[in-house]
Structures are given as structure tokens and as C-alpha cells.
Amino acid sequence: MNSWQATFDDLGRPLAQTTFVVLDLETSGSAPKSGAGITEIGAVKIQGGEIIGKFQTFINPGTPIPPFITVLTGITDAMVIAAPKITEALPTFLEFLGSDKDTVLVAHNAPFDLGFLKAAASLHKYSWPKFQVVDTARLARQVLSKDEVVNCKLGTLAKFFNATVSPTHRALDDALATVDVLHGLIGRLGSLGITTLDELQNFSSQVSPAQRAKKHLAANIPNSTGVYIFRAADNSALYVGTSRNLRSRVRSYFTAAETRRRMRDMIALTDRIDVVVCPTIIEAQIRELRLIQSQKPRFNRKSTNQESAVWVKLTDEIFPRLSAVRGVKTLSDESGWFGPFNGSADAELAIAALHEVLPIRQCKPKISTRSIATASPCALLDMGKCGAPCIGMQSIDGYRTLTESVITYLTTDARPVIAQHEMRMKELALAERFEEAAEVRNRLSAFIRGSARAQKISAITKVSEIITARKFPDGSKWEFIAIRYGRLAGSALSVSGVSLTQTIESLKLTAEVVIPESSILPASTHEEIELLLNYLEIPGLRLVDVAGTWHLPVFGSGQARASMADVRKSYDADNRWLTATQFESS
């Protein structure tokens, strides 16, 4: 009988004996595929939990660093002007990395950093070694639960694992923080019996017993566009999703490609899978939103509380103030409002942006004749940030001028707000007061996002009907949708033998009848409206018919983005603004 003794090579390289290089890049914001834009490289070589080498260098990107990148990272043009270009730095960095047989690369959101490095290597004719890679962001999503960390951002994980260095958006600091995160994750994996490199790399390829046992649930799913709903034994919805190919997407949940722990937990509870076939992907996405809103599936994270979004409004008082509120019930087109925002903090930043420009009162007590007689002014009066209507120093008519300016900035012309904040941000950046400049940037960004969203939402909800057409990339079919007061009313695909004009007319007749309400969202939720707005900006989409006026302010907050007014001009210029009768001949 032959005996066989396993070696350490057969068992896999122990993690304690593996050389890891943890790296991080800072960039000027260009796309990774360009092969340019790297401004700093930081890397740390570790083995057995000990740091055995460090690498850091600035990189001259060859182009000016945008101000917002300088504000974020603190890296200025002056800091990189004498630095080597990437073609000069790559050989030294590759030498530091070592052989792909000995070294494993580690990065947080590794595809981003490695995308830049591989593109730069390709552009400058360097061969990029076939390193094994560990992505700490992906690994954290598998190892840590939602109860432990709210997200898997590097700052969140560094704090959770008590990292000795906090991330600062500088390459070496962020690489050092990632080292501690990696060690924390390896410690967690050790409790699961994972001690070798092979076990670490195969960890995400494990298929759970529940995935194997319930794979048959995906057997009869059609190869169609639509919505899928995972349901529990009590018929409650566990998870709702959408796909262009329902069969392929649903089957992926039962393979090693599905690495999310919460999805594996969801599969363990699944009793059946329902599908809703839709003619177009946009209809499937809208149905998904509506199902999530109505059924509140426990494993969906997004869109479950659309009705509780945060907005900002002028209060209904003789001396109005700006207030953050949840829901749209208290909002009307007769008063200033904007949003929605991603949270209360974003809303407060946007309010602060307006407070910087206009001396709107910030105190919460209601002002009346009786209160004016006994009130005392706050410090904002001395700072020139308030006209003190609380003590009668400002008349109702005089204060109305301020509130009218607020409404103008929100709905018509945001240039005064943008100009004042940009000027202040540049002053602070030039003085190298980057943290203060970042605060100004955050306030301006929140204001622009909130007011631009409000302008686009308000514009489309006032249009009684929009009919659009979009040709499939392969030219085989056309898809049409009908939007009424910001709500998807119907969609259709062209059919062989049926004229396009006839298809459009049929869609108009069969589309949902939408009765607008008095709310600022008369027939839909803000998420549905914004999904439709994104769809309307797809290149090649054609507007067939618009019933009513659809426009955006030329000087509104959305001027930096592709405003719908400019989109319409391009349609006119390209002869793509078509009536239903003109469409047939095109």
C-alpha cells in the first residue's frame, strides 16, 4: 500500500507567510482607461502582520489638478510639478511590488486602483504582472454584517477595526489604514478556519447549502425582460429585482457569483420566485420601484421609504424660514421648496448655503406682535446674517423681498448662490485652508443637487403627456413609452407588420389614465420621476409628442448638467423633435 504525506505547498500558502502589498492611489479624476491622471501612489509591504517596506511618490499627471480634487486631497499643482511622470515612476513601483509569484496585491475597491495602474502600464508599454488580488471592500461585505458596519467604506472599516492611521484621501495614509482593515478581516476569517491564501481566494466562491437546495426554483424562469420577486412561505415579498434577462439573473443567485451574505440569507427563506414579464426595461424598473414601495421587501435596501425623503421648504409664516421636512404633504408650488435630499445632513448643508447668501431668519419661534415686544436679537444680527424681524427691525414687505429671492434662486436663477460660494472656495483653497474650502464646497454641492432635482421634477410633473421612441441598438425594434404627469403610463414594442404610427396611437389609447393631484408629485414618487428623467436623457432617444410646456430655467442649478432645455434644442437641431406623423417616415 502506497502512503502519501501532504506538504505545505499542497495545503496552500499560509496567510502568515504571504507577502501582501497594500496600495492606494490618488488621481485627478480622469477615467482609469485613459492611463493618465494618477497624482500619488502609496504602498505598504507586509508579511506576518509586520510592515517590511513602504513606497510613496507624487506623480506629475501632466495636466492641472482640478480645484475640487485639491480641496478633497490637499494635493496641489505645486506639489506635483517636480514629481516624476507615471512612465518614470512605474519601473520603480513594479520593482517594489516584486514578483507575481511571491506578492499578493491588496486594495480597497481594487478595480479602481488597478484599473489606473494597468491602463498606465499598457499606455507606456510596460508589462503588468498577473498578481493575485484581494479587495478589502468586497471581502468586508462578505465577512461583516449590516449590524456591525453601516457600509464598507474605508473610513467606516478603519474606525471599526481601530486602525492606527485614519484615511485622509492621501495615498500612503489610506494604504496604512487598509493594512489594519486587512488584518482585522483576516482575524475574522481565522475564526472561520480560513488560514491559507487558497482558502482566502476561494472564500467568495463557496455555494451555500441553501443555494444548492433551492436552485430548482429558477428552473422555469423565462428569458425575458421583467421583474422577479423572491417570496417566503407566507407569501410575503423578500426581495424585488429587475433584469433584461430574468432567467440568467435569477439563476445567478444560486451560484458562486452571489457573494452577498444578506442575499444568501434571503435565499434560505425563499419558498418561490414570481416574475412579471414587461415589454421594456424601463417599465420593469418602474414596476420594481412600485412593488418595493407597496410590499416593503425586507431584503431590499433602496427605495423602501420613498415617501419619507427629506425636502426643504419655506415655512408658512409671515416671516418664513427654511426648514427640512420629511414627505411632500406640506409642500406646494405656491411656496419655495427643493429636494429631495439624501438625508437630513444634506438638507441642512443646502439650507446653510442659502443662509450664506441671504439674511433669512434662522430661529424657530413664530414671530407675532406680542413676541416682538419681548424678544431679544441673537448674534446673527451683529454678524449681518439676519435683519432681526423678531424685534421688529424688518417689515413684512421688506422680508418678503428676501423670500422672493429664495424662490428665484431655487426656481429660476441660481447664479448668485453659485458665484458667491465658488469665489469663497477659491479664496480658501489659495490660502491652503482646504478643510474650510471643503465645507463651502459641500454646502454648494448640496444646494445645487437639491435645487436641480426640484427643477427637473417640477418641470415634468406639469406635462400631461410625453411620448418617446428609442431604437434597439441592433436596429431590430423600437420601444415606446408614455409618461403622464411624471408617471409611467405605459410602454410598447414595435411589431412586424404594424406601422409605427399605429403602435404609437395604440399606446396612447391603452396607457393608464393619470389624474393629477394637488401635491408637488401629482401622480408618482420622486424616484419614479427621476428614473424616467434619466431614461429621457439616453443618447438616441426621440421625443415623439409632448402635450404642454416642458422646460427648465437657463440659469437654474442644473446648468452644469445636461438641462432638458438644451436637450430639446439638440433635438430641434438634429431634426429629432418629431410629431407622431413625422415619425413614421424617419
Image: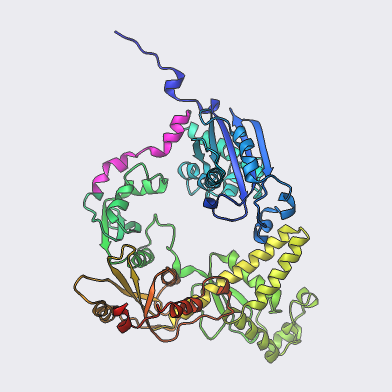
Q: Residue at x 68, y 58 (%)?
A: 71
Task: Name the residue furthest bottom.
Answer: 397
Left or right position of 8 against 231: right
Residue bounds of the magenta highlight:
196-217
Using the rendered view, name the quadrant where residue 278 is placed. bottom left
Using the rendered view, name the quadrant where residue 433 is placed. bottom right
**Quarter occupied by the C terminus:** bottom left
- Residue nearer the viewer, 316 or 98: 98
- Residue nearer the viewer, 504 or 578: 578
Q: Is residue 197 above or below residue 471?
A: above
Task: Name the residue furthest front.
Answer: 125
Left or right position of 455 against 585: right
Task: Name the residue furthest left.
Answer: 497
Q: Main secondary structure of the magenta part?
A: helix
- Residue nearer the viewer, 16 or 386: 16
Residue 198 picture location, percent across and down: 44, 30
Left or right position of 216 against 92: left
Task: Name the residue furthest top.
Answer: 1
Q: Is residue 184 above or below residue 141?
A: above
Q: Residue at x 41, y 86 (%)?
A: 548
